[in-house]
Amino acid sequence: MVNRGSYLVPDFYKEFACKCGDCRISCCEGWDISISQKEYYDILSLETSEELGSRIMRAFYIPKDADPERFAVLNHDWLGRCPLRGEDGLCLLQVEKGENAIPQLCRQYPRSIRPELSEATLSNSCEGIIELLLNRTTPIKYVMEDLPYESEGHEAPDRFALRMQCIGILQDRHSSLKESLLSLGNLICGKQPSGRSFEDCLSALMPFCDLYAEVSPSISDYCVYAKKNLEGITGEDYKNRYRTLINMAPNMDLTLENLLINHMFYEKFPYSETRENEEEEFVSMCGLIAFIDLLITGNSDRISCRDDLVDLLSHSFRMIEHTSFHHNAHLLLSQAGFDDPADAMYLVFL
């Protein structure tokens, strides 16, 4: 019997459905997906077709530092593809043996289940989630749903109240998203923005392009292209580039709001599991928003349709939500002299 618990989830949680073979970039592509010892031997013990059995034998390797929870790692081919993925994009293990045969991580993604908080979230790194939020014009609400997982606890009341207050501030549509971010900064840090030049702000963000062009396969090309297009640009030209996207995506501000809200809930802002305190987390969040804006603006002449925008956003959050981005963002902004929240707030007005 499966235990069921009451979980706090975004109201579109049950709308999500995996795109399966229709994904342009599969969630198993390029990622070091690991499985437990039990899952590994359960998969090896399955009675399968000869073709699937052959694929299973080369699908995983056991690293030197293996432990019972991270026992085997997906062994991608030279193109970064999962050996269990068919030409039609479908998981051959799931097709032949059913959903319960695939690893838990594959079954759950892009969901993140947090039994200790009785919360379940959805990651922006999935293009299906980006598409849901790109179509949405109403604010995200958080509701209780019964899920097939045991509920173990809840967030401390004062921390939960602040998390929801932060989300509420950004969903106040009497103000622009950027104005709401200033209110958020005032709540978290008690600061108002200082005056920094456009050139200073752009210079503070270029090291993001340099770093992630080198270390992130997901967005390396976007970073290189953005830096090439934006070096030496004026503030007015920068804004004009961004405006060209509005014709294709007239609800861009609402999309960015929903993406940011979803990300904040995913990260438990301002109480993420990284080493930053609340003030540093806010600085990192400003860096995130400005960097996303920069990638969109710097690649605007290559975004000719909705899919192009979805790809850029999902690739960006693939890096942001599954690496130490927030920690790195604070370090990069500190090196650029933007570690004070009053300065970091100014980045969002690029």
Image: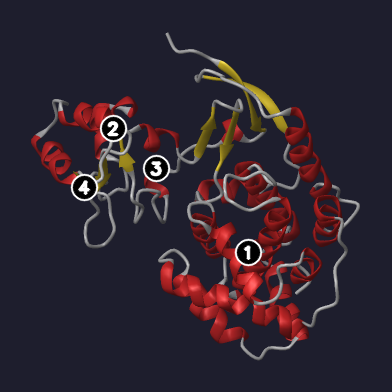
Q: Residue at x 66, y 35 (%)?
A: 10
Q: Which of the two discs, 1 and 2, labels the residue nearer the N terminus?
A: 2
Q: CA distance from mark 1 to mark 3?
A: 36 Å
Q: CA distance from mark 1 to mark 2?
A: 34 Å
Point out which mark residue 64 bears. Answer: 4
The answer to whether mark 4 and mark 2 are in CB contact below 8 A is: no
The reply to whether residue 217 is visible in this rendering is: yes
The answer to whether mark 1 and mark 2 are in CB contact below 8 A is: no
Name the amino acid, label 3. Cys
1 vs 3, front mark = 1
Q: Which of the two discs, 3 and 2, labels the residue nearer the N terminus?
A: 3
Q: CA distance from mark 4 to mark 1?
A: 33 Å
Name the amino acid, label 4. Lys
Which residue occupies the foreground of this view, 49 or 162?
162
**Residue placed under numbered mark 2 in the picture:** 68
Indicate the quadrant containing the N terminus: top left, top right, bottom left or bottom right.
Answer: top left
Is 233 located above or below residue 20 in the figure? below
